[in-house]
């Protein structure tokens, strides 16, 4: 059969194929036990449950949205080794429109979301008759299984995925199809257990997420009870089980939930005593903040980015965003670029060396004052021309005469200064002072001599007189 321009044989592979590892993950993967024995009680923590935690949801969507909003561009390396934006009939179209139903922004977001949630991103290539990749589809990780032959060859088993074009007609009625690794772009998080299986941050912060959800659920039950803690009704003497059950049902029906706050009249020595700890006693806010900070630590997101705690006392926000980029986004973006470069075959069979690159200027926007100082310093140092600074910092077009970097005239190169110092200009004796002109008859004093020299246009005598 032929799938997306690739000829797939029914023989699959000559050697037997084995899954790379058990529980390779997926959109609905089980993260881990929220407590000992949870597996036996069918209380596993699923990915959907973890995503219900506000910190997990905030970190995942923040990272994906920030990378999605950065422009992904095709660049080419010139003879000086400088990478500049380029255009290619083979590569540019798929980078502008990766598939029939997604923009490049949503494609990048889905790529990162799949990687953060499951630890793995699988992208299926669609080729034309020339073998050029014309479409890319991010697959559901739950429907992909990496396979390895005894000799180390890597294949991927793809299950039915109608949105990616793997419907019944494409699979010819079979449950799945096996394709070689050359037709899949596999971007994975840190592989802790197997080189082909990435581990999601949720694996490490799953318990913190479960604890945060439990705190929120308990708080929701507390407030649904009119902000009144649970308690017990006590009697001075012994009461039968039937009487106790009747009193319990009566109390719950009339003084809990929406009826909380009503006046209860107790007789026969009955007394109500609260049992549940208050929010202050249980340090609810501190515990909830701790769970959110733990999630942020696993995602490498500064807590203030999801409004947990206060922001650092910086007058300029640029250092905060630089920290966020360097410790969280940079590795994800670099892995995205290298995986896409290899998957598209950039720089292999073409005259120029191509690559993909995120323009991080779209991520770190400078305020007007900082932007102006940066432009002024770049131009003044001769690093960029005025036109380059206008385009980079202000998005403005070129002006006449602004295409060349400028330096001040009195600046000298190090080579010129070294040549001057080689002649030892400071070790030469100072020039001798020219002698004063002899006084002619009638020049009785210094003033008369100076006046006489001026009349004779003897300027040296005028200066040194």
Image (tube, grey):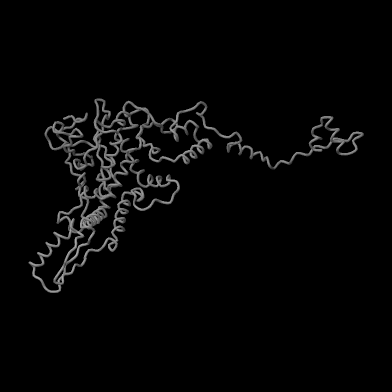
- Using the image as rendered, state which of residue 87 and residue 302 is in the foreground: 302
Q: Position of residue 424 (x, y in %)?
A: 67, 41
- Using the image as rendered, state which of residue 139 and residue 348 is in the foreground: 139
Residue at figure coordinates x 18%, y 38% from the top left: 158
Numbered circles on residues, count: 0
Residue at figure coordinates x 33%, y 31% from the top left: 348
Kindly indicate the quadrant of the structure image that contains residue 84: top left
Direction bottom: furthest residue: 237
Q: Position of residue 173 (x, y in %)?
A: 11, 34
Answer above or below: position of 354 versus 270: above
Left or right position of 439 against 102: right
Q: Position of residue 81 (x, y in %)?
A: 43, 33
Left or right position of 373 against 416: left
Left or right position of 380 against 445: left
- Using the image as rendered, state which of residue 225 and residue 306 is in the foreground: 225
Left or right position of 369 against 122: right
- Using the image as rendered, state which of residue 179 and residue 403 is in the foreground: 403
For the N terminus, the image quarter is top left
Answer yes or no: is residue 148 visible: no
For the C terminus, the image quarter is top right
Kindly indicate the quadrant of the structure image that contains residue 346: top left
Answer above or below: position of 247 versus 354: below
Residue at figure coordinates x 28%, y 49% from the top left: 56
Kindly indicate the quadrant of the structure image that contains residue 128: top left
Answer yes or no: is residue 86 visible: yes
């Amino acid at each position: 059969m032929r799938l997306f321009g690739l000829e797939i044989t029914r023989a699959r592979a000559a050697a037997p194929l084995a899954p790379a590892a058990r529980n390779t993950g997926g959109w609905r993967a089980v993260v881990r036990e929220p407590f000992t024995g949870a597996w036996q009680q069918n209380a596993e923590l699923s990915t959907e449950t973890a995503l219900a935690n506000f910190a997990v949801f905030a970190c995942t969507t923040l990272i994906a949205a920030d990378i999605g909003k950065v422009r992904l561009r095709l660049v080419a390396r010139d003879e000086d080794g400088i990478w500049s934006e380029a255009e290619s009939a083979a590569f540019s179209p798929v980078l502008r429109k990766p598939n029939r139903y997604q923009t490049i922004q949503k494609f990048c977001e889905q790529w990162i979301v799949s990687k953060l949630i499951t630890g793995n991103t699988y992208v299926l290539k669609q080729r034309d008759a020339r073998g050029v990749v014309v479409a890319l589809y991010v697959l559901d990780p739950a429907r992909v299984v990496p396979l390895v032959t005894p000799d180390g060859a890597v294949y991927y088993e793809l299950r039915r995925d109608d949105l990616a074009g793997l419907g019944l007609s494409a699979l010819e009625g079979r449950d799945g199809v096996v394709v070689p690794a050359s037709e899949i772009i596999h971007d994975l998080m840190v592989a802790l257990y197997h080189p082909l299986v990435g581990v999601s941050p949720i694996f490490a912060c799953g318990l913190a997420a479960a604890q945060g959800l439990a705190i929120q659920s308990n708080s929701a039950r507390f407030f649904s009870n009119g902000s009144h803690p649970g308690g017990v009704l006590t009697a001075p003497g012994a009461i039968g089980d039937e009487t106790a059950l009747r009193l319990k049902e009566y109390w719950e029906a009339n003084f809990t939930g929406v009826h909380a706050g009503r006046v209860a009249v107790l007789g026969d020595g009955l007394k109500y005593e609260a049992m549940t700890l208050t929010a202050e006693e249980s340090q609810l806010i501190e515990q909830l903040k701790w769970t959110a900070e733990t999630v942020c630590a696993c995602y490498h997101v500064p807590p203030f980015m999801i409004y947990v705690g206060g922001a650092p006392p910086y007058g300029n926000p640029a250092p905060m965003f630089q920290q966020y980029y360097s410790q969280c986004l940079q590795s994800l973006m670099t892995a995205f670029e290298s995986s896409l470069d290899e998957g598209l075959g950039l720089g292999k069979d073409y005259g120029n060396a191509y690559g993909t690159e995120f323009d991080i200027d779209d991520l770190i926007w400078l305020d007007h004052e900082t932007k102006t100082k940066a432009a002024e310093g770049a131009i003044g140092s001769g690093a960029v021309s005025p036109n380059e600074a206008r385009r980079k910092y202000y998005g403005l077009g070129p002006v006449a005469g602004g295409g060349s970097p400028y330096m001040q005239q009195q600046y000298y190169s190090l080579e010129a200064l070294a040549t001057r110092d080689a002649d030892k200009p400071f070790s030469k004796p100072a020039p001798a002072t020219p002698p004063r002109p002899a006084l002619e008859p009638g020049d009785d004093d210094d003033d008369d001599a100076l006046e006489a020299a001026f009349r004779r246009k003897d300027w040296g005598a005028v200066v040194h007189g």
